[in-house]
Structure formats: C-alpha cells, structure tokens
Image (cartoon, grey):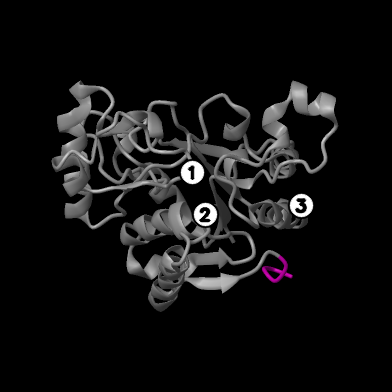
C-alpha cells in the first residue's frame, strides 16, 4: 500500500510559539526565536509535535512525504510595503487590511510604486471574478532565508530521521511571485502567464494520485490547507478523493477577525464539502493504530 503524507507550510512563521521568559542574552542575540512567528496560528506548534510523533511511529510505512513552503520576498502584493492610503501610509502589519477592486478604483488604496497600479487593479479585479478570497494584507511572513521560513524544528528533526533511510522529502515552494497570492500549493490565486511556478502543478497532483492513501496536514486549515486540498480534489478525479485522509489534530485555523466567525465558518465548510465528496477524517494517533 502506497501511503503519502502532504504537510502544508509547517514553517516557523506559522508554527513557532516563541519562548517565554527567555534569557536576556538569548533575546538580544536571537530576537527572532524569542517572539512567536509573524503569523503564528494558535495550536500549530502542538499540531506539528503530534505530526512528528506520528511520522516516528509510521516511519517505515510512509512511502513519500511532501512539504510545501510558503516562500515570500519582502515586496509582495499581500505585504504592507506594497500599498499606501491617501495619506501615504502603509497598512499596519497586523491590521489584516482587506483591499477590494473598489478600494483601488476610488483611491482608498494605491500601490506604493505608481508603475504597479494598473497591474494591481487587474489583480484585485481578477480575484473578484474568480471568486477567491479578497486581497488581504498580511504581516511580512515566510521571507526566504529567514528563521520564519524554516520548518519548525520538532518536525524538521523528524523529517531528517525519515530521510536517513535514503528517502527524500519532496519540498514544494510557492509564493515567490510578488504579483499574486499563493494560498494553494498547487496553483496561485491568479496564475501569472509568464511564470510556470504559478500555474497548476500537475506534476505534484499526478504524484499524489499514485497514493493509495494521502494524509493531509499542516497550516492553516482555514487557508492554505483548504485551498490546496480543494485544488487537488478538483483535478484529482472524484474517484480519487476517497484516498484523502485529513488528520484533524495536525491542522488549525487562523483566528477569526474580531466579532466574526469568518475563518471558522470557511474551515467548517471546507471540511463538510470535502467529506461529502469522499474525504475521510482521522487523527495522528488513530491512523494505522
């Protein structure tokens, strides 16, 4: 039986909880490891501990492990530096500003670099046409070559142990194109016709189709995991969706915006829709126990 594990974005910026009461010398020398990841998802650190324990338990039974890596530059259409308001101010790092087509048309938000204005307007227009998420300005995160970009240590260590039997983790990068968001690991929200890396990744999908069981995990369930699984399912063939098994104790949601259940509702809908299509649910301790 071919068992493959797909881990979505198990990176420090999503999964690192920070260090409480750190030694002052440590805090001065390594400030990034003291504070939580820039987009820490509550519960993600425990998700990855459970996942690492499962990998250790099932070490010889896992035929392939795929790990997606959110991979951003500082300048990105979904980072604050890209946008300014009518007063010339960037969105706050933790304001989670939503920018719509109307916002760009009426000047509520414009691009910091005027040369980017038309392309950005085309982008938010296409988002509305596609019915994807509206553009959300996130704190800078998963910047390539930073601590936040790396896989959280507890999982990275276990992946290294798995590789020592001459296996090889399949690392899949996404998000380095500054012109588009890339929640899904297999396709950008608005593919760039000049960048194959934003197009549908049929090579990965065809590899996953070879699995008899495809285990699903990672962060965040409400965003990147949900979009990845939906895009895979939509290109998988309905008969293959029953191979998918969501490890519900190895994924968590982005916290809801204050006063809403927006992300919880989106996550619940994702799970219910996929279960209706044949996806199964399990946990890291129940699977092959």
Residue 213, how many percent across, how many down?
54, 63
Label 1 sits on a secondary structure element that is loop
Crowd class of label 2 (few under 14; some 14 to 19; many from 20; radius 10 Å): many
Residue 257, position in %: x, y? 46, 59
When asked about the image quadrant of residue 115, the answer is top left
Q: Is residue 24 visible?
A: yes
Label 3 belongs to which residue?
Answer: 56
Q: Nearer the N terminus, badge 1 or badge 3?
A: 3
Query: Which of these two is toward me, 237 or 80?
Result: 80
Q: Is residue 275 left or right of residue 289?
A: left
Does residue 6 sit above or below 148 in this rendering? below
Q: Is residue 210 visible?
A: no
The residue mark sitting in front, 2 or 3, is: 2
Q: Quadrant of the N terminus?
A: bottom right
Q: What residue does disc 2 label?
A: 220
| Region rendered in magenta | 285-289
Left or right, 158 with respect to 134, comes to right
Task: State which quarter of the image contains the C terminus.
Answer: bottom right
Residue 288 lies in the magenta-colored region: yes
């Amino acid at each position: 039986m071919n068992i493959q594990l797909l881990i979505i974005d198990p990176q420090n910026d999503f999964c690192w909880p920070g260090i409480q009461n750190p030694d002052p010398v440590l805090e001065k020398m390594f400030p990034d490891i003291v504070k939580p990841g820039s987009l820490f998802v509550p519960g993600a650190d425990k998700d990855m501990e459970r996942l690492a324990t499962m990998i250790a338990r099932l070490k010889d039974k896992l035929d392939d492990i795929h790990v997606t890596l959110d991979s951003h530059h500082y300048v990105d259409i979904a980072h604050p530096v890209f946008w300014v308001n009518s007063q010339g101010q960037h969105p706050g790092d933790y304001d989670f500003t939503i920018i719509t087509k109307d916002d760009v048309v009426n000047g509520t938000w414009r691009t910091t670099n005027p040369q980017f204005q038309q392309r950005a307007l085309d982008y938010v227009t296409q988002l509305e046409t596609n019915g994807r998420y509206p553009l959300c300005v996130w704190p800078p995160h998963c910047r390539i070559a930073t601590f936040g970009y790396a896989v959280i240590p507890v999982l990275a260590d276990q992946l290294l142990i798995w590789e020592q039997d001459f296996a090889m983790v399949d690392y899949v990068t996404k998000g380095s194109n500054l012109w588009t968001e890339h929640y899904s690991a297999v396709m950008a929200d608005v593919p760039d016709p000049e960048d194959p890396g934003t197009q549908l990744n049929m090579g990965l999908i065809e590899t996953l189709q070879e699995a008899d069981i495809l285990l699903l995990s990672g962060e965040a369930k409400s965003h990147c995991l949900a979009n990845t699984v939906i895009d895979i399912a939509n290109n998988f063939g309905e008969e293959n969706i029953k191979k998918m098994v969501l490890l519900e104790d190895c994924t968590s949601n982005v916290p809801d915006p204050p006063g809403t259940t927006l992300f919880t509702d989106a996550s619940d809908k994702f799970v219910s829709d996929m279960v209706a299509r044949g996806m199964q649910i399990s946990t890291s301790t129940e699977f092959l126990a």
